[in-house]
């Protein structure tokens, strides 16, 4: 609790520095990330998942026999303004000749797939090219000369395997950054995999400068990795040419203590309230506040926390094979993240 209070005091002015980049629309001071979910049967969902032929099976809840559909009908309503409707043609035209890359884990994949489905559904006759090169998935619309890329990197910093098979998390190494630098838009995401321990932990040792150790508190490692990323942006990225976003922490609803609900199983409506403080989100904001370059915080944490109904639950892979209260059904909540991205993207 003391850690949280200290961070809160440090972050009291976090939006002071980033206010024009993060959460204002127009000149009326509207905070896009404060609001409520409103049932809207007329305009939602934004697309029919059945006409998105490339959607990942784990996100296609209706195809996996989810019986309820109200979760598709909610629109995010900011308190002081209206979130503009998504115009796919305008979006494609303002990104004409540009490349947008999502960098992160499967939550980034979730958002990337949402955006490509939104764009494809708006112009289903437009040819698209989908290919994969190494760890990068590339989705291109030749009609608009736009490319939307997804680069899988759960930690941003490197994990390298030594000759003896030991896997080392290198907190001060960011070798993948060479593939990010030339993008016109970058959207980063990093938290989900930091929580994994035991057999799911993908490293054996941590290298931190000249120190090597087995492990440390995950928020500590997470902050060190974010600082390495922040230093790279400050020193290497020309933010007058490349717009940089960091996606806020995507909340999971996999246990009552962390979610304020009895997991996402059987939840069919947004939660009435949420009081959880996300320490990892406070760490992210602390790092962003200390940066010299402007980075846009896509602050989706609180608005998504209400949406325990938006996860695949037992409909992520068809039937009761496993439970997913981490990712999000498509169509659904993540589409709103892309509506917010559209506003902050400007141009």
Image: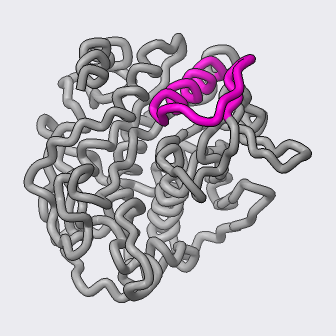
Left-right relation of 108 to 17: right
Tell me if residue 333 can be seen: yes
Q: Does 241 sit above or below residue 330?
A: above
Left-right relation of 223 to 172: left
Q: Residue at x 15, y 42 (%)?
A: 275
Q: Position of residue 91 (x, y in %)?
A: 48, 49
Left-right relation of 151 to 217: right
Q: Which residues are magenta?
A: 206-232
Q: Residue at x 54, y 39 (%)?
A: 188
- 125 falls in the magenta region: no
Q: Residue at x 38, y 69 (%)?
A: 329
Q: Does 151 sit above or below residue 128?
A: above
> Which colour style is shown?
one colour
Q: Residue at x 59, y 70 (%)?
A: 126
Q: Quadrant of residue 176?
A: top right
- 214 falls in the magenta region: yes
Tell me if residue 347 can be seen: no
User: What quarter of the picture does the N terminus occupy?
Assistant: top left
Q: Position of residue 182 (x, y in %)?
A: 73, 34
Q: Does 123 sit above or below residue 343?
A: below
């Amino acid at each position: 609790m003391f850690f949280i209070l200290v961070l809160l005091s440090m972050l009291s002015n976090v939006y002071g520095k980033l206010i024009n980049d993060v959460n204002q629309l127009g000149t009326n001071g509207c905070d896009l990330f404060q609001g409520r979910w409103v049932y809207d049967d007329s305009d939602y969902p934004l697309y029919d998942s059945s006409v998105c032929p490339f959607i990942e099976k784990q996100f296609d809840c209706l195809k996996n026999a989810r019986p309820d559909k109200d979760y598709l009908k909610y629109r995010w309503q900011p308190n002081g303004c209206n979130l503009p409707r998504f115009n796919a043609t305008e979006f494609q035209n303002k990104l004409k000749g540009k490349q947008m890359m999502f960098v992160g884990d499967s939550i980034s994949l979730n958002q990337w797939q949402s955006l490509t489905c939104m764009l494809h559904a708006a112009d289903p006759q437009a040819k698209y090219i989908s290919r994969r090169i190494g760890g990068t998935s590339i989705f291109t619309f030749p009609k608009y000369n736009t490319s939307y890329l997804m680069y899988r990197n759960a930690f941003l910093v490197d994990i390298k395997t030594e000759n003896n098979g030991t896997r080392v998390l290198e907190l001060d190494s960011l070798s993948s950054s060479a593939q990010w630098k030339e993008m016109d838009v970058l959207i980063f995401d990093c938290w989900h995999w930091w929580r994994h321990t035991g057999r799911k932990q993908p490293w054996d040792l941590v290298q931190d400068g000249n120190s090597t150790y087995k492990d440390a508190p995950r928020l500590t490692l997470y902050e060190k990795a974010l600082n390495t990323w922040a230093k790279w942006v400050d020193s290497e990225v020309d933010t007058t040419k490349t717009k940089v976003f960091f996606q806020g922490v995507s909340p999971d609803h996999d246990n009552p203590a962390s979610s304020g609900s009895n997991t996402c199983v059987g939840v069919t409506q947004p939660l009435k309230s949420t009081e959880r403080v996300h320490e990892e989100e406070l760490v992210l904001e602390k790092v962003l506040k200390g940066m010299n370059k402007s980075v846009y915080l896509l602050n989706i944490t609180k608005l998504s926390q209400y949406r325990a109904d938006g996860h695949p639950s037992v409909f992520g892979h068809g039937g009761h094979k496993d439970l997913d209260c981490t990712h999000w059904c498509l169509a659904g909540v993540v589409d709103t993240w892309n509506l917010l991205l559209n506003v902050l993207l400007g141009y």
